[in-house]
Amino acid sequence: MSQHQCEKAQPLIAMVALNTPLLPSPAALIQSFRAVSGISVDLTSLQAKEGNIVFGIGNDNAAIALMRRPISWSKLEGPCATAWWWPEATEKMKRHGSHVLVALVGGSGNLIQRCITLTHLVAAVAAPTDAAGIYWGGGTLVHDPLVFIEQAKDISLGNLPLHLWIDFRVEQNQDGSCRLFTTGMSVFDHLEIEIPHSTRPAAEVLSLAHAIADYVIMSEKTIREGETIGRSEAEKVRVNYAPSMWDANTTVMRLDL
C-alpha cells in the first residue's frame, strides 16, 4: 500500500475567511465546484441545513460549515506577515468577521488527489462568496482568494500547486546568506526541508527546494541519509537528517548547498 494510500485517511481542513457571513446555496456551490474542477457531484448524497452543506465526493465526505466568527488571529498573524506573494494579506484578513470551514473527512485514498479535491472545494466556496482570503492549515499559508481560484483550475497530478499547500520560507541570515525551511511536507508524511545557510541567490534556493519537494511527494520515495539529489545528473546536493533549526526535537531533511 502506498504511503499516500491509507485505510483511515486523516481529515484535510482549510478555511475561507469571509467579509459577509453567507454560505453559497447548495446549487451555487455544486455549480462552482464543477466550473473549477470539471467534476460533477452526485447530488443524491447532498444534505443541507442552516450553515452546513455535506455531500459525498469520491471516497470522502465534504463538510462545509459557516462559522460566525473570524479565524483566530493567532493562526493568521504570522502567515499574513510573511506572505510575500500577497502583500495585502494582513489588511484583508484582519477585517474579516466570519469564515467557512472546509473539510474532507471519513475517506480513504490517494493523499495527493485528496489535497487536489480540497483545493477545488475551497475555490468552489470562495468563488460565489464575499471571500477575504484563504487559510491553508496544513502549510499555515494564506492566499488571495482570486489568485487561489484561478490556480485551482489548472491543477492536475502532473501540475501540483505546492506553493498553495507548502510554505517555502526564504529568509536572510545576518551574514547576508539565505536560509530556507518548509511547513507542510509533514502532511504528506515526509520530513520538512531546511537549508540553513546558502550563498546561492534566494530565487535559486527556492527553485531547488520546490523541485525536490515535488520529486519527493510525487515519487513517494524517501531520500536516505547521505544520498544526493538534484534537478539534473550534474547537480548533486547532499541530504542529511538533522535537528531542525527551530526545534531540536524535530528531524528535518537538511540540504547542504
Image (cartoon, helix red, strand yellow):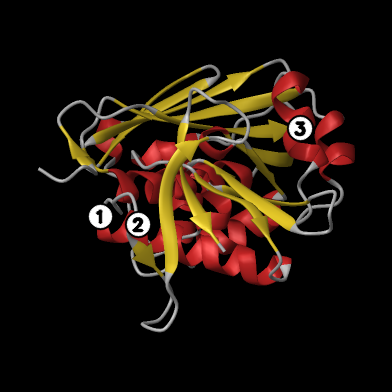
Q: Disc number at residue 78?
A: 3
The quarter of the displayed image where residue 20 is located: top right
Dot 1 crowding, Cα within 10 Å, few <14, some 14–19, many 20+: few
Residue 185 found in image quarter: top left
Viewer-closest of 27 and 111: 111
Residue 221, disc: 1
The kind of residue on which mark 3 rests is Gly
Tell me the residue at 60%/46% (across/down).
181
Q: Is residue 90 visible?
A: yes
- Quadrant holding the N terminus: top left
Where the C terminus falls, by quadrant? Answer: bottom right
Residue 56: percent from left, percent from top: 28, 34
Task: Give the distance between the C-alpha atoms of the residues marked 2 and 3, in whole angstroms.
Answer: 27 Å
Q: Quadrant of residue 141?
A: top right
* Residue of label 2: 216
Q: Tell which circle, 2 or 3, labels the residue nearer the N-terminal end.
A: 3
Position of residue 187 relative to residue 174, above or below, is: above
Of residues 138 and 247, the one nearer the viewer is 247
Sequence order check, earlier mark of 1 and 2: 2
> Closer to us: mark 1 or mark 3?
1
Q: Is residue 70 visible?
A: no
Q: Is residue 211 above or below residue 60?
A: below
Q: Are marks 1 and 2 in contact (CB under 8 Å)?
A: yes
User: Identity of the amino acid at label 2?
Assistant: Val
| Up-down relation of residue 70 to residue 144 (above or below) | above
Instruction: Please state which of residues 42 and 64 is positioned toward the viewer in this rendering.
Output: 64
Distance from label 1 to label 2 (Cα)? 6 Å
**Mark 2–mark 3 contact, CB under 8 Å?**
no
